[in-house]
Image (cartoon, rainbow, N blue to C red):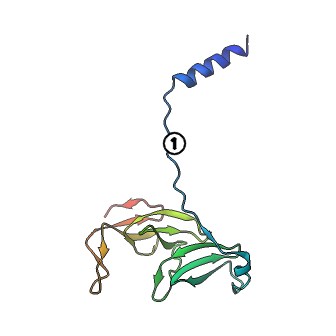
Amino acid sequence: MKLLLPLIISISFISCSKSTPIPPKKIFPSRYMSPSDLEHINFHNKELTTIKLNNTFYYLRKDGKMRETLEFDGKADRFSDGLARTKINGKIGFFNTNLEIELKPIYDFAFPFHNGVAEICMGCKDGGKDALLDGGRWKKISREGVLLEE
């Protein structure tokens, strides 16, 4: 009877409490290079290297994990403040040197971080031949993705 009472109380508490659904965590899958292709890559004694496949730059880890990155001046986007930019489904986000997404790709454009701050644009569009970007709202975010007051 001593064990039965706590069990009944627990069951009634669980059944009476409101359940709040937990939203699914958005996962941004990584790509992996096959081991046979990985054998031909020279990492120059570094953990990461960059490769260009089908006109797209990727960061590649020794275990084959790959993350697409932006191109800047004909090269792969560089890490700045420990983060590099990626584009997923047309939106810009940031990933770390372990190739994990740290800031979800929700921005229409973003400049690299500098001293813990990045300028981002929401609603801007490709400006065509004459301009890099057109329209949108420019804001600044912290490395944690928090909007900063201006």
> Residue at 48% across / 78% down in the picture?
70
Percent from the top left, x then y, of residue 3?
Answer: 73, 16
Q: Report crowding for label 1: few under 14, some 14 to 19, many 20 or more residues within 10 A (C-alpha).
A: few
Rendering quarter of residue 41: bottom right
The one of 50 and 52 positioned closer to us in this rendering: 52
Whether 15 is drawn above or below 94: the answer is: above
Q: Which residue is mark 1?
A: 22
Image quarter where the C terminus lies is bottom left
Whether 94 is drawn above or below 6: the answer is: below
Is 121 displayed left or right of 113 in the figure? left
Total marks placed: 1
Residue furthest bottom in the image: 74
> Residue at 52% across / 22% down in the picture?
16
Percent from the top left, x then y, of residue 35?
Answer: 73, 76
> Residue at 49% across / 39% down in the picture?
21
Percent from the top left, x then y, of residue 137?
Answer: 28, 67
Residue furthest top in the image: 1
Percent from the top left, x then y, of residue 138?
Answer: 31, 68
> Residue at 70% across / 81% down in the picture?
37
Kind of residue at disc 1 = Ile
Dot 1 lies on which element? loop
Is 143 displayed left or right of 5 in the figure? left
Image quarter where the N terminus lies is top right
The one of 132 and 150 positioned closer to us in this rendering: 132
The one of 142 and 95 positioned closer to us in this rendering: 95
